[in-house]
Image (cartoon, rainbow, N blue to C red):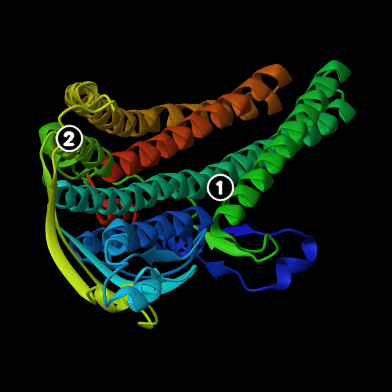
């Protein structure tokens, strides 16, 4: 029957009813409360808005402009040539000459007008199309980063959860050993009182008991640190009691697929690898954008002007106009050739990085798989060592009571049992962590719980 682990801070909390928390539920709490994950989710929301903004590149630009201009002097014009009018001085039109020589004001010094302008690019060399592709890739990257963060949190949650379980197991093991040292110390005192053993044996038993007590205190401190770290990850108060699994039970019949299955699955679904693939795609799109700088740009434009028609110039000007314009940059100081070449090099760089990432990920998956198999084999191989240590302790205790063994031999037997139990518990912990990493790499987190439930 399992002995459940109770996590308390303070003796007064012992009366509270502990809440049982399985690893699956703990992970769900982490997904709900982790601020780092919320930050990554915010990055996804931000990139979604930027993706929508990029689609606006296909819309025309409409602006309403207003101007006020003060001229140095009014704009005047003469209707007739002054020299030609002087030839008419002796004619019947002579009385009208003073009026005909006066200039006409086309526009006074103050000009106020506004215009509704529309500009729409018809051809940009594909910049809008490739910019939208880049935006879609960036949004996909944000989703992949979110998934990668979730998998990372699963590994961290498993480490802290089973870290508490392991710390409690070690504490219990050392506590049991401490009780054994205490019982041996009391037996030694009784035998000394009867004169069956020397005082030296009793002192040795006391020293062993004191050392064991110190180890128990160290294990207790380690347990409290593990609990605090786990509560911090769950974002919950440390004074709330929790009930976790009592041990890390490895199932003998729990079988895994072969290593090739996990390698192929990892290369297929692991988010970090897809992010690398997206970097390759991004460099291709950036290369297209750089190449578009060599192509002409064509756009349509139009404007509707508003004025008060207070001057002859205002009355003469049309209210609207439309047109099509084109620009082809033949020589540019922006270094577009070098930028295009750099984008090609960046594409090659990203391809090499992705290829290396696949190799590294394959190696990591194979290494993790072999660790899982190895730890499982070690765990069950230690069963015989545990049985031997238990039997050796029984024999040493009986021999001591019969005067055929020393306190040192009993203490060594007790410590040997503790060490082999702690070793097996540590192997189980390493097995669980490696298995969690293996399923995180292959994107099969849900399968992990079946190996321990």
Which residue is found at the position 25% from the left and 40% from the top? 275
In the structure shown, which secondary structural element does the residue marked by tag 2 occupy? loop
Q: Is mark 2 in CB contact (under 8 Å) with mark 1? A: no
Coordinates of residue 175 in the picture (x, y in percent): 67, 42
Which residue is found at the position 28% from the left and 39% from the top? 272
Q: Is residue 343 above or below residue 124?
A: above
What residue does disc 1 label? 164
Given this view, does label 2 or label 1 mark the residue nearer the observer? 2
In the structure shown, which secondary structural element does the residue marked by tag 1 occupy? helix
- Which residue is nearer to you in this view: 335 or 253? 335
What residue does disc 2 label? 329
Q: Is residue 300 above or below residue 209?
A: below
User: Neighbour class for label 2 at 10 Å: few (<14), some, many (≥20)?
Assistant: few
Coordinates of residue 451 in the picture (x, y in percent): 29, 51
Coordinates of residue 437 in the picture (x, y in percent): 33, 40
- Which residue is nearer to you in this view: 97 or 180? 97
* Mark closest to the chain's N terminus, 2 or 1: 1
What's the mark number on residue 369? none
Coordinates of residue 291 in the picture (x, y in percent): 14, 33
Please indicate whether residue 151 sits to the left or right of residue 178 in the image. Answer: left
- Which residue is nearer to you in this view: 315 or 21? 315
Q: Is residue 359 above or below residue 116?
A: above
Examine the image and state in which quarter residue 116 appears. bottom left
């Amino acid at each position: 029957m399992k002995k459940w682990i109770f996590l308390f801070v303070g003796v007064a909390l012992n009366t509270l009813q502990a809440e049982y928390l399985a690893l699956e539920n703990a992970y769900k709490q982490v997904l709900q409360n982790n601020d780092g994950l919320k930050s990554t989710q915010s990055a996804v929301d931000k990139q979604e808005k930027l993706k929508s903004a990029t689609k606006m590149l296909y819309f025309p630009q409409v602006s309403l402009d207003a101007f006020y201009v003060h001229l140095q002097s009014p704009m005047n014009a003469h209707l007739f040539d002054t020299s030609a009018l002087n030839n008419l001085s002796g004619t019947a039109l002579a009385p009208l000459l003073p009026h005909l020589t006066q200039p006409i004001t086309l526009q006074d010094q103050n000009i106020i007008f506004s215009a509704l302008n529309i500009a729409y690019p018809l051809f940009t060399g594909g910049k809008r199309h490739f910019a939208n592709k880049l935006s879609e890739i960036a949004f996909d990257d944000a989703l992949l980063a979110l998934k990668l963060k979730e998998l990372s949190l699963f590994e961290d949650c498993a480490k802290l959860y089973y870290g508490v379980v392991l710390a409690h197991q070690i504490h219990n093991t050392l506590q049991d050993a401490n009780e054994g040292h205490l019982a041996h110390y009391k037996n030694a005192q009784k035998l000394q009182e009867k004169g069956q053993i020397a005082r030296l044996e009793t002192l040795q038993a006391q020293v062993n008991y004191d050392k064991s007590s110190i180890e128990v205190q160290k294990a207790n401190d380690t347990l409290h640190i593990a609990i605090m770290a786990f509560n911090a990850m769950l974002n919950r108060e440390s004074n709330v009691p929790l009930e976790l699994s009592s041990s890390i039970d490895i199932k003998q019949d729990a079988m895994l697929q072969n290593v090739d299955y996990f390698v192929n699955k990892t290369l297929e679904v692991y988010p970090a690898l897809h992010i690398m693939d997206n970097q390759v795609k991004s460099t291709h799109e950036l290369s297209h954008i750089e190449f578009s700088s060599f192509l002409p740009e064509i756009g349509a434009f139009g404007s509707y002007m508003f004025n008060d028609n207070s001057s002859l110039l205002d009355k003469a000007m049309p209210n609207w106009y439309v047109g099509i314009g084109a620009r082809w940059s033949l020589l540019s100081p922006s270094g577009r050739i070098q930028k295009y070449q750099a984008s090609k090099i960046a594409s090659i760089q990203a391809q090499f990085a992705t290829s290396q990432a696949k190799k590294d990920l394959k190696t990591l998956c194979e290494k993790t798989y072999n660790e899982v198999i190895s730890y499982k084999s070690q765990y069950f191989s230690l069963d015989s060592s545990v049985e031997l240590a238990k039997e050796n302790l029984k024999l040493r205790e009986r021999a001591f009571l019969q005067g055929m063994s020393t306190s040192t031999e009993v203490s060594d037997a007790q410590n040997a049992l503790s060490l082999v139990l702690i070793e097996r518990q540590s192997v189980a912990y390493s097995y669980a962590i490696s298995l969690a990493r293996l399923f995180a790499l292959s994107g099969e987190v849900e399968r992990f719980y079946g190996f321990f439930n």
